[in-house]
Image: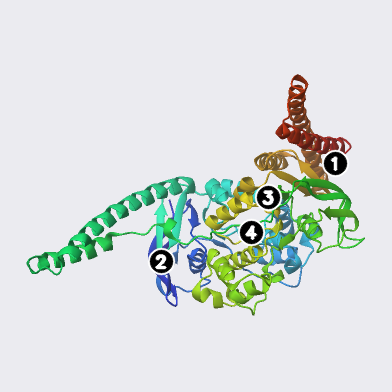
């Protein structure tokens, strides 16, 4: 197998922080490498050195003569003039039809291709970068967080494309499911070293846990021996006849101390809680005949009817550009409804997290100044410092200006600000972007345990699967309830993606992309109609069991069953409205 790249004794440091310390490796022609590590461990730095975007302090990187390198830089700034199609033709050196063909596979249609690249949304900019990269037919890809801002259908397209692609790749992503599905080799960077494991990330994490448990047991044994030896030293070090033996024992303790090893679980991880003032159960928000958008000529979605209870964990899903953020901003009161209403319960206290840190952070303020500014006036300084520490901002970090923070640090800082205000409703737009996998896991668990209401827009599959209990999809100018789990929603999208690739213009009835989209929309509508019918049957069945219990036990008082009966009647009403809406399409 051809070798695409060789790195020899790479070193890199920023001041006292050593990122790479004599790292060497090679990449073969079919290697699929998942590069993992904490925020700030050096993943992006390593990829930038391999691509030649940043010099190493020492060592060499050598590409073979036939290596065609494709680099996806999450921080690349797109042109502020010209069209997206012109950008692809200029960068890829391919004719227009080839650019349009590959762009269409990633959901870039005429509207996007005629737009100025820098004016596209974050998700469409990432799609454009991916298409530009693939037009050059690379055989070694360096992908740094390629799924940031990508919607789920495009992520599935990308994953399917890369699974069939024949070249080598090195991939970093906070979405462990993507690495699991694409990479057969796992590298972890941290502490200046690069651990290389011949296996997927799931197997690697299991192996790593076993190794860490072995190290923990060894450390416990060494500490017991050190304590026992220290007892001898403390007892006899000043006794003349045993002083020499005591000195020997002191040296033995020093040798044992050098054998102690740290494990990654000992590294600091964000650890926080979300406090929520007590509230009574009931409806959190009610939207009726709601229209959202940016004016009469820019309506994004119409006739939105939805409601969910207090304490629900709601996922807003759909393709980029269809209105997820617009719906969230309207719910937050940042955009006025164009028609209808979105009415929260009277005690709702809303906290909003924007996917753009520029919306929330003053670049000239320090970390501590930012937290002090967003905290309520009665919050003591001790709590502000404790919150900063819980999100890994300690000592010198508190004096960092926001302008120098990394993407992960910015996200952690804004989340820290939310926790200080004790909201009972959280509206979160892509909160997991830029966070490492460990912090994403913590965030999902904390939000799940949070007593209040959470409405989240995210395409991170592991995060959403662990958090949400109900799903609303924004698509083609409408918002609909998906009657199933998030896992089922992803499965449906994968099936539709496969059908999309299999459908020909002839199959679509009218030909061209419009026919294909209409065909797939009808298929999706039919699938959802069947799921809604099945869900209705399940709800009616459970309701029937409760009613039979009350019929057979008319004198029994059972508040739990009575409460569940009320929930079921509400859910059945929602499912019936959804069935009617789907059947009329």
Q: Residues within 10 Å of mark 2 (few under 14, many from 20)?
A: some
- Asked whether 557 or 192 is in front, the reply is 557
User: Gap in Å between the C-alphas at discs 3 and 4?
Assistant: 11 Å
Q: Residue at x 70, y 51 (%)?
A: 105
Q: Is there a contact, CB below 8 Å, between mark 1 and mark 2?
A: no
Tag on residue 510? 1
Q: Quadrant of residue 556?
A: top right
For discs 1 and 2, the disc positioned in front in the rendered view? 2
Tell me the SS state at disc 1.
loop
- Secondary structure category for the residue under label 4: loop
Residue 192's label in the rendered image is 2
Which of these two is toward me, 438 or 180?
438
Write down the residue under mark 3.
152
Q: Which mark sits nearer the N-terminus, 1 or 4?
A: 4
Packing grade of label 3 (10 A; few <14, some 14-19, many >=20) is many
Q: Which residue occupies the extreme bottom position in the image?
A: 364
Could you tell whether 329 is left or right of 240 in the image? right
Q: Which residue is mark 4?
A: 148
Q: Nearer the viewer, mark 3 or mark 1?
A: 3
Assess disc 4: are there few (<14), some (14-19) or many (≥20) residues with their C-alpha within 10 Å of its C-alpha.
many
**Closer to the N terminus: mark 3 or mark 1?**
3
Q: Is residue 91 visible?
A: yes
Is 226 above or below relative to 551? below
Q: Are marks 1 and 4 in contact (CB under 8 Å)?
A: no
Question: Which residue sits at x=78%, y=56%?
Answer: 347
């Amino acid at each position: 197998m051809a070798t695409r790249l060789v790195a020899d004794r790479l070193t890199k440091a920023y001041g006292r922080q050593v990122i790479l310390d004599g790292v060497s490796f090679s990449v073969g022609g079919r290697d699929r490498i998942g590069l993992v590590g904490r925020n700030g461990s050096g993943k992006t730095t390593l990829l930038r050195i391999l691509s030649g975007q940043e010099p190493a302090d020492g060592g060499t990187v050598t590409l073979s003569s036939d290596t065609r390198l494709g680099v996806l830089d999450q921080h690349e700034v797109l042109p502020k003039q010209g069209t997206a199609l012109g950008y692809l033709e200029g960068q890829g050196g391919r004719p227009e039809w080839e650019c349009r063909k590959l762009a269409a596979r990633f959901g870039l249609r005429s509207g996007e291709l005629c737009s100025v690249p820098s004016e596209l949304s974050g998700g469409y900019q990432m799609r454009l970068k991916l298409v530009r990269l693939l037009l050059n037919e690379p055989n070694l890809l360096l992908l740094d967080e390629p799924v940031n801002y990508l919607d789920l259908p495009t992520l599935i397209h990308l994953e399917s494309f890369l699974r069939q692609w024949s070249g080598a790749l090195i991939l970093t992503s906070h979405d462990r499911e993507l690495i699991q599905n694409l990479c057969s080799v796992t590298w972890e960077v941290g502490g200046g070293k690069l651990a290389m494991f011949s296996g997927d990330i799931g197997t690697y994490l299991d192996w790593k846990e076993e190794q860490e448990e072995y190290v923990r047991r060894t450390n416990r044994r060494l500490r017991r021996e050190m304590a026992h030896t220290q007892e001898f030293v403390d007892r006899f070090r000043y006794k003349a006849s045993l002083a020499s033996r005591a000195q020997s024992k002191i040296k033995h303790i020093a040798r044992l101390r050098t054998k102690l090893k740290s494990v990654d679980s000992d590294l600091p991880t964000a650890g926080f809680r979300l406090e929520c003032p007590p509230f009574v159960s009931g409806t959190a928000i009610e939207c009726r005949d709601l229209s959202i958008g940016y004016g009469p000529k820019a309506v994004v979605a119409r006739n939105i009817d939805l409601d969910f209870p207090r304490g629900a964990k709601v996922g807003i899903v759909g393709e980029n550009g269809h209105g997820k953020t617009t719906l969230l901003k309207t719910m937050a009161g940042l955009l006025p409804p164009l028609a209808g209403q979105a009415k929260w319960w009277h005690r709702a206290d809303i906290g909003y997290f924007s996917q753009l840190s520029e919306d929330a952070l003053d670049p000239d303020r320090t970390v501590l100044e930012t937290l002090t500014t967003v905290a309520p006036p009665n919050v003591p300084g001790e709590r502000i410092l404790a919150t900063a520490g819980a999100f890994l901002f300690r000592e010198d970090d508190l004096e960092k200006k926001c302008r120098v923070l990394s993407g992960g640090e910015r996200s952690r800082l804004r989340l820290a600000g939310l926790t200080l205000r004790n909201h009972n409703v959280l509206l979160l737009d892509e909160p997991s972007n830029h966070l490492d996998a460990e912090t994403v896991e913590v965030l999902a668990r904390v939000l799940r345990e949070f007593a209040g209401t959470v409405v989240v827009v995210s395409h991170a599959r592991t995060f959403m699967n662990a958090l949400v209990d109900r799903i609303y999809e924004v698509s083609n100018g409408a918002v609909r309830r998906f009657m199933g789990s998030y896992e089922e929603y992803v499965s449906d999208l994968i099936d539709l993606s496969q059908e999309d690739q299999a459908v020909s213009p002839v199959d679509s009835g009218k030909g061209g992309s419009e026919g294909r989209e209409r065909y797939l929309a009808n298929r999706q509508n039919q699938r959802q109609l069947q799921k809604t019918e099945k869900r209705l049957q399940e709800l009616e069945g459970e309701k029937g069991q409760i009613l039979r219990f009350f019929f057979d036990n008319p004198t029994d008082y059972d508040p739990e069953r009575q409460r569940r009966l009320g929930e079921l009647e509400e859910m059945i009403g929602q499912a019936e409205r959804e069935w009617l809406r789907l059947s009329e399409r």
